[in-house]
Image (cartoon, rainbow, N blue to C red):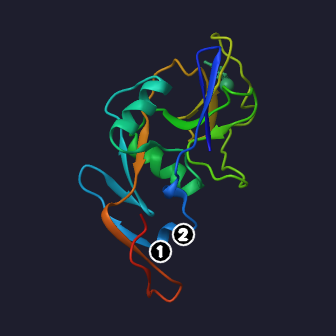
């Protein structure tokens, strides 16, 4: 479930089918990514070429058939940082709907979301008056809430290309597709 606030008046809910967060551990999902997408875990990743606002970055990823990534582990957080080559990176989470209630793209209902806040963050501070989006800080890979109008790189995350399959604990074929 992903809440998206449009303007100041209209509020609508978009329910995203979230096959990226299937219950199958990523290490047991097998498939292909086409260049320049990079394979990591059970998905394909690609950084935007230039810094964009949060909304523009989210739109850029969606036009590629992907979602802006919101890391779910320290390992994935580090991987995103490595793709962005020394830049700050958006995390696909916002508390625009309700201050202090962070909702992440693709987060699973009923499950706690992964966070990696810098000490003292989120503080909703800054000269813009509100900080409803999140970036991964280049310097330490920790998260800071920041104004959504700032411009950073984003990493897009998409499913494998074509068919893929999953294996069980014994390494045997479990299902014939993970789409
Ligand atoms: C603060 C951050 C804030 C940023 C805005 C920093 O000095 O520590 O919390 O988001 O300024 O530019
Ligand atoms: Ca902040």
Q: What element carries label 2?
A: loop
Left or right: where 36 falls relative to 94 = left
Which corner quadrant holds the N terminus?
A: top right
Q: Quadrant for the C terminus, please.
A: bottom left
| Picture layout, residue 129 above or below residue 96 | above
The percent position of residue 157, horizontal first and vertical second, equals: 42, 48
Where is residue 29, by image quadrant? bottom left
Q: Ligand 2 near label 2 (Cβ, under 8 Å)?
A: no
Which residue is rendered at x = 71% and y = 18% of the image? 125
Dot 2 and dot 1 residues touching (CB under 8 Å): yes
Residue tagged by mark 1? 28
Q: Is residue 61 above or below residue 110?
A: above
Q: In this picture, is 8 found above or below 47? A: above
Q: In which quarter of the image is residue 135?
A: top right
Residue holding disc 2: 25
The residue lying toward the viewer, choosing from 69 and 117, is 69
Q: What element carries label 1?
A: helix
């Amino acid at each position: 479930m992903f809440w998206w606030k449009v303007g100041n008046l209209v509020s609508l809910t978009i329910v995203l089918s979230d096959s990226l967060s299937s219950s199958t551990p990523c290490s047991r999902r097998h498939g292909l990514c086409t260049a320049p997408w990079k394979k990591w875990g059970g998905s394909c990743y690609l950084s935007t070429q230039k810094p964009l606002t949060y909304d523009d970055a989210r739109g850029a990823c969606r036009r590629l058939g992907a979602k802006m990534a919101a890391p779910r582990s320290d390992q994935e957080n580090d991987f995103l940082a490595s793709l962005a080559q020394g830049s700050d990176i958006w995390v696909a989470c916002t508390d625009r709907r309700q201050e202090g209630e962070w909702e992440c793209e693709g987060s699973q209902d009923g499950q706690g979301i992964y966070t990696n806040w810098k000490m003292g963050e989120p503080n909703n501070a800054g000269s813009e008056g509100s900080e409803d989006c999140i970036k991964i800080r280049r310097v330490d890979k920790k998260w800071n809430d920041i104004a959504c109008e700032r411009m950073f790189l984003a990493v897009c995350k998409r499913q494998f290309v074509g068919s893929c399959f999953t294996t069980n604990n014994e390494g045997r074929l479990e299902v014939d597709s993970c789409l």
